[in-house]
Amino acid sequence: MKAEYDFSQSRPNPYIKDLPKQEVTLLLEEDTLHYFSTLSQQIGVPYQQLMTLYLQDCARLQQAVPRQRKGRKTHVHA
């Protein structure tokens, strides 16, 4: 690997618009948004992208999400 790469002549991926995506609106608890926002600042990746990567991982692994009972918060500890 090179120590440094020159991206001055690079261009955006012309095929990105062909990827199927759907815009959605999510209502998030403040602590959830704070977690992803803080993590995004630490590693330099937008929090929306982190959330997408996490959800893609869950889908790929077919990871079950704990069901929440009415009036009770469910906390998942990793």
Image (spheres, rainbow, N blue to C red):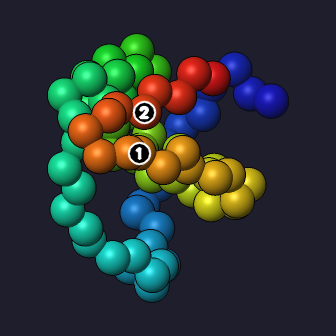
| Residue at 63% from the left image edge and 23% from the top image edge | 78
Q: Are marks 2 and 1 in contact (CB under 8 Å)?
A: yes
Q: Could one spot residue 23 in this view of the protein?
A: yes
Q: Which mark is residue 28?
A: none
Specify the amino acid type for callout 1: Gln
Give coordinates of residue 31: x percent, y percent: 26, 23
Q: Which residue is at the far front? A: 70
Specify the amino acid type for callout 2: Thr
Give coordinates of residue 45: x percent, y percent: 40, 33
Give coordinates of residue 16: x percent, y percent: 44, 73
Residue at the spot of label 1:
68
| 30 sits to left or right of 10 | left
- The secondary structure type at the circle numbered 2 is loop
Q: Could one spot residue 37 in this view of the protein?
A: no
| Residue at 34% from the left image edge and 22% from the top image edge | 35
Circle nearer the N terminus (2, 1): 1
Residue density around tag 1, few if under 14, some if 14–19, many if 20 or more, within 10 Å: few
Quarter holding residue 77: top right
Is 55 drawn above or below residue 31 in the view shown?
Answer: below
Number of marks present in the image shown:
2
Is 13 drawn above or below residue 55 in the view shown?
Answer: below
Residue at the spot of label 2:
74
